[in-house]
Image (cartoon, rainbow, N blue to C red):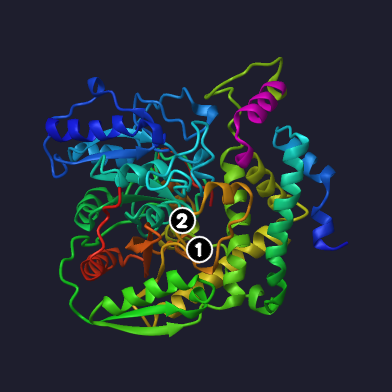
Amino acid sequence: MEKKIDSFKKIINNNKNLNFFISEIDFKKIDINKNGILGNYCYVIKDNISLKDFVTTGGSNFLKNYISPYNATIINLLNEAGAIPLLKTNLDEFGLGGTGTFSFNGNVVNPLDNKRITGGSSSGSAVAVALKSCDFALGTDTGDSIRKPASFMGVIGYKPTYGLISRYGVLPYAPSFDHVGLFSRSIDVIQLVMSVIAKKDFKDFSSIESNINFIQENINNEIKVGIMEDLMEDLNKDVLDLFNDSIKKIENIEIKKFSFGKELINLIPSVYKIISYSEAVSCYQNMTGITFGENLGGKNFEEIAIKNRSSLFGQELKRRFIIGSFCTSEDNYEELFLKSKKIRKLIINRANEIFKYCDFIISVGSSDIAPLLEDIKNKKYNDKNADYYLQVANFGGFPSITLPMGKINKMPIGINIMGKLKSDGELLGFAKKIINYLKCESDHV
Amino acid sequence: MSIKEKYNSKEKIVKYAKNLLIELNEQDIEILIYELNEVIDGLNDFYKIDSSKLDSIDYIYDNVNNFRKDIIEECENKEEILSKSKSWNGKYIKV
């Protein structure tokens, strides 16, 4: 094990310039010679997940020196299984961002092309796996924060059914959308880790009982796969051709074509923003710097809170909070927030309707390869239907996984599969089958 | 007043920021007006959806609240709900 850790450490040290981690784990504080089902596995932790006695920043200036007094449940489960943590990885502040450019610690650099973004918010975790500096990585996914960077980095990114992994000890973004998930280069590893961490946790009231068999090897029966035609129609020709070629390689599937409904797809980004920003502003109302976090001082409560919140929150966070506050104010609550919740339910109902006719919905992991940082800064890059669609899995808590599909202009792009609630075992089994057919390894860096 | 006009107000943005104990600079305000308009524009399609279709939607039970629904359904009275809720980290779940 020590040899393996040394080799991972070497990769980490050689790639410090990529800014993909916030802190390294001090091995004096942990036992690295533990037995257990994951005793031979090393992992990295997105820095919005609490690790006892280590700094947990959430990617925010506000918590840059905050030492967590307890472990997140998921960390306890991994500890008990013998897994070794290596790093706390960089992220967009509290998960509110999709680019890897909104951390107090600076931008995460894409190792495949430094001019392009990594995607986010689990940027550092995606990079750690792409660099082969760990066996798996913990991330969180509120809109597409695991699956989009996985697509951009050419690795596997998996968000399970809502509630399967406890969020106790995980800094929130929008609790009704938030999921903890995994990155890896191997489905086998994801299956094994899920069998360890998918446990009901009485400390997380949204946690559910799992009787799922995650290690399903032989999915041999014919699988009905749904493809949404209206998600595909605005894709670039290169991406569409690669997707169609990939689908042709997968044997023993019956393809059924559907329309998700343009009317609903168009509403996804606004519904996502209104609900997630509203939940986020509620989650961070208590962050004043008085009871915990950085405190710049002041004469009274108001002065301290204004000073801290104005100076320590990043620009993107402040903007999202204000929009959230707007949407939940007395004047706008019914017209914006409640209506968004109703539309969300319509979108979930539509997905469930489609699942009556197919086992999985397949789409792309992103509408294009990782965009250029400059295009993001100048607002020259726009998401497409296929990008918005990833959020449907968060709306309804559906399990969803992005796998490497191929490359365009030497940059990776993923394929995405979404399944019915609690179909995670079958989803991972089917994902394994797809990887075998596509023969596309997560081996880009 | 159109929806867009209703939100396109510098004063309102400053007011909401103040409620959140956040001070904004001029550049922040400009970006916020732009982004708010983007969100509001995205909502135009709301109005294409038949409102009667929306009225009947049970929006309460999303991911989080589904759990509460389970607790409520399996308990016979309020005391039982509260006693079950108490077991979660010693905190009550509001029911």
Contact check, label 2 and label 1, Cβ < 8 Å: yes
Decide: is A235 above or below A409: below
Task: Count up the numbered dots.
Answer: 2
First in residue order: circle 2 vs circle 1? 2
* Chain assignment, label 1: A
A214 and A370: which one is in front? A370
Q: Secondary structure at mark 1?
A: helix
Give neighbour class at mark 1: few <14, some 14-19, many 20+ (Cα, 10 Å). many
Tell me the chain of label 2. Answer: A
Q: Which residue is mark 1?
A: A387
Expressed as whole percent of the image width and height from the top left, the position of residue A306 reads 69, 27
Q: Amino acid at mark 1?
A: Asp
**Any mark on residue A75, and which?**
none
For the point 39% across and 32% down, the residue is A17
Magenta residue span: A303-317
In the depicted structure, whether residue A172 falls above or below residue A337: above
Looking at this rendering, what residue extends furthest in the right direction? Answer: B1
Which residue position holds label 2? A144
Nearer to us in this view, A387 or A284: A387
Q: Nearer the viewer, mark 2 or mark 1?
A: 1
Q: Is residue A309 magenta?
A: yes
Q: How many residues crowd around disc 2 within 10 Å: few (fewer than 14), some, or many (20 or more)? A: many
